[in-house]
Image (cartoon, grey):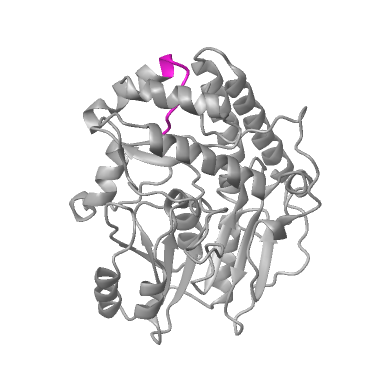
Amino acid sequence: MIHLLRQFDPTTPPPETGGGVEQWTPRCSSSCFASTGRSLVAFLVDTLGLSSDHTCLIPAYVPEGVVQPLRMSGIRVDFYRVDHRLFADPERLSRQVEKDPSVRLVVLIHPFGFEQPVRPIRDMLSGRGIAILEDCAQALLSRTEDGTTLGQEGDFSLFSLNKFLPVPDGAVLQSHCRGTSVDCGQLARGPEGWRESILAYEEHLRLNHALLTSTSPDRRLLEETGEAYERYYSFVNRELGLSAPSDVTLDRLRRLAPGAMAEARRRNCALLYAGLKQTTFRFVYPQWDDRTVPMAVPVRVRPEERERIADRLFERNILLSTLVDKWNFIPPGRESAFPAESEFMASHLLVPVNEFLSSEEMEYMVATMNQI
């Protein structure tokens, strides 16, 4: 089955590259390599000395792994609106900041690996005592127009590796402010339950591989891999203490090659953008170039048609996913204040371009989508 779920086949490991986490992230003033991204968000709040007197602005379409540690750290959380591309509007954000002098941190996301312009917002916030955290979890391999890795325009950047790579844990917080270090030193292994969560995620990856090699639609496998993921998630969602990444992740990072992965995803993106002609699907980002290496390519369909379209493709052994669960943080009763977020969550499908998909599989998927 064609899908975007991260998977790893232990029987055919890629060749050793000799690198570690440093080959996946840009250079910086200081960094912390820990087990989870949410623990690093909590660590950053503490490092910056933020409290209930301060506010962090985030989009309402945002991963729970950003929201939950902010709220548990005691800092106030407020939401800014995004446009149809899921990008922040600098002018609207400026007005929001002017009305709230307690804002000390703004989180910007590069959605699905497509670059959100950071510099205009950085220039707007300059001199106001407000830091920018770039969430690069979905943009691990994307580059700016000048070829540099995303995550270097803001004050801090966050890379959550298992949002993109077939590893059970691992996240990196980077500081680009020489006056603020995020060096966390040598970390210990996680607390009770941590090892079980790693095993649950490995089971999730194994089941995703079984789904990939399945020659017919199998909802049972989908349910089982979802259950394995939830066992992992139930632990990481409540544990915000810093701990070291697992040995599984450290070993696998040495066996994964970023260059080959990026090249395969670029090839698959090129096939998708050149081949998809069916107007049922509308690209959220109509223009693509090879500096963008997406986690997935989002398309819009008519909301009332989405389930039917997804079911028809599933019958042809193609899984187009959605990303709403654990991402919808529009305040209850304020849906009309966030029209772009609401529309996206109701209408999108995510098209896989993963490195483990061959050119033939991509061409089959595109041809099938053109027949819808």
- The residue at 56%/20% (across/down) is 221
- The residue at 40%/61% (across/down) is 116
| Picture quadrant of residue 180 | bottom right
* Total numbered labels: 0
**Is 295 positioned to the left or the right of 174 in the image?**
left
- The residue at 66%/34% (across/down) is 200
User: Looking at the image, can residue 266 be seen?
Assistant: yes
User: What's the magenta region?
Assistant: 314-325
- The residue at 58%/22% (across/down) is 211
In the foreground, 287 or 56:
287
Residue 316 belongs to the span the image colors magenta:
yes
In the foreground, 249 or 283:
283
**Residue 176's spot in the image, x, y percent?**
58, 75
In the foreground, 299 or 291:
291
User: Looking at the image, can residue 332 be seen?
Assistant: no
| Picture quadrant of residue 125 | bottom left
**Residue 279's spot in the image, x, y percent?**
25, 32
**Residue 199's spot in the image, x, y percent?**
71, 35
Furthest toward the left, the residue is 336
Quarter of the rendering occupied by the C terminus: top left
**Residue 56's spot in the image, x, y percent?**
41, 69
**Is 159 positioned to the left or the right of 33 in the image?**
left
| Residue 341 vertical position relative to residue 211 in the rendered view, above or below | below
In the foreground, 231 or 150:
150
**Is 86 positioned to the left or the right of 188 in the image?**
left
Residue 244 belongs to the span the image colors magenta:
no
